[in-house]
Image (cartoon, rainbow, N blue to C red):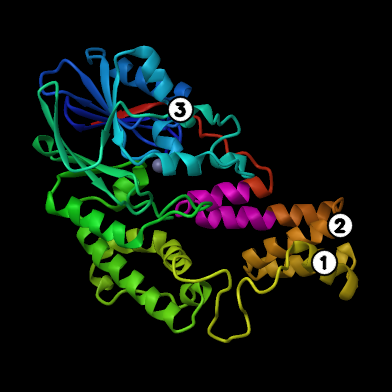
Amino acid sequence: MSATPTLREVVPGRVFSVHGFGFSDIFFVVSNNGNELIMIDAGTQPASLQAAHEFLLVHHTELPPITTVIATHAHWDHIGGLSYLRALNPNLKVYGRENYAGTVDRVLRNHSYQQFRGANFDHAWVENYQPDITISERTDVEIAKTRVELIPVEGGETEDAMLINFAELGVIFVGDILMPYYGEPWVEEGFMDGAMATMDEVIKRQPKHILHGHYPLTELYGPTQIKQFRTAYQWLVTTTRHHIRNGYSAKDIMRLNLIPPGLEAHPEVYLSYLAPREHIIARTADHMVGIWQEDKTGQEPGGLYNLTSVEYGRLLAVYLDLSPKQVAKALQKIIANGDNELALHLAVAAEQRFPADQEIIQIKQESADRLRSSIQFFDPFKFVTYSEMINKEHKPVLAEPVSTK
Ligand SMILES: [Zn+2]
């Protein structure tokens, strides 16, 4: 999740991270005896992983061959490049969890939002995933004189999460245990209590570096933040459950602007807390409510109606009797007031009735663009979804690759 190809030397000569080649980060660890390169996860797709590997070798020509991959979990963006590595080294050994099948199965659905995984996403990259060595309990392994502790956990995202601890290097790889959506947003995933137990496993090992599957998470949930974030997270989950039990909807709770007591003294976790807050509430609620959801007024039950933009379009054009010009004028007013979600929602409805009206199409783009710009640093999946709704591909920023120590 970085626009510019970047190489970081996390532990000099031993641990390298590469960003900007596909959706996830790519990690390489040089073994204690210097003879083998151990990879954590296998990138997003074969071509981008190959590019990342070659980028690393340009800067560090002396590195040994890749012999081992250890997978933090079986989401598409962490195992997608595996076939490149198998072709490179037929004797490659892949470590992964024994219960990966459920995660792979959920990946194999066909999303209507193509930009989420890329238009050329190929199910074959993940459907044949099979670790050579499966891990079902805490295990110490030695790889080329390197001690590695493998800790199966129920992470915040998936049931097949695994922490990978290089204690001698002070580095722990945690995959996506704290991805702000607590599971892929389109599927039924996420373990709210599992995330807490997983954070405890990380905290008690006192790592110097906590490396997540995506660079922004490494910035947000490092050793200086994770303890305080855990406290804030627990408070938010508990408070959300309390409100749900009292008949509030997830949207009601999101509107409460919940801030844990004492958080003001910890500016280092403001962003760590705010970035996932809405999704933590939504996931926690989702695990508690049924196909219908209560709300605090009793007048807005979720799931009771089956209204879509078709009915709102009919409201605008047939019942309110508005012309495309009048609808456009109202939408302009809504945008000017900063009600961008409402504007996009109604613009989609208006487009149903007036599909050829250029002004309405333009307003729809404008409201989606405003939403994209306001969440671009917080919410990559919303960014992708808004982009797709207006059919705007987001091309990578072209820049010179950089290497930092
Ligand atoms: Zn990921």
The residue wearing badge 3 is 128
Q: SS class of the residue under badge 2?
A: loop
> CB of mark 2 within 8 Å of CB of mark 3?
no
In the image: residue 330, left or right of residue 265: right
Picture layout, residue 211 above or below residue 274: above
Bounds of the magenta segment? 366-387
Q: Image height check: is 316 above or below 72? A: below
Q: Is residue 125 left or right of residue 139?
A: right
Q: Which residue is mark 2?
A: 354
Give the CA distance from mark 3 to mark 1. 50 Å
Q: Secondary structure at mark 1?
A: helix
The amino acid type, in three-letter code, at marker 3 is Asn
Q: Disc 2 residue type?
A: Phe
Local secondary structure at mark 3: loop
State the residue at coordinates (26%, 13%): 61
Q: CA distance from mark 1 to mark 2?
A: 10 Å
Can residue 97 be seen in the rendering of this structure?
yes
Q: Nearer the viewer, mark 3 or mark 1?
A: 3
Q: Position of residue 234 (x, y in %)?
A: 29, 68
Give the residue displayed 51% in from the left and 49% down from the top: 381
Q: Residue at x 55, y 80 (%)?
A: 295
Pointers 3 and 1 in contact (CB under 8 A)? Answer: no
Earlier in the chain: of badge 2 and badge 3, it is: 3
Q: Main secondary structure of the magenta part?
A: helix
- Residue under circle 1? 327
Residue 262, percent across and down?
A: 24, 75
Occupied quadrant, residue 352: bottom right
Relative horizontal placement of residue 29, taking residue 110 as reference (left or right): left
Q: Amino acid at mark 1?
A: Val
| Vertical arrangement, residue 57 with respect to residue 140, above or below | above
Is disc 1 in contact with disc 2, using a CB cutoff of under 8 Å?
yes
Q: Residues within 10 Å of mark 1 (few under 14, many from 20)?
A: many
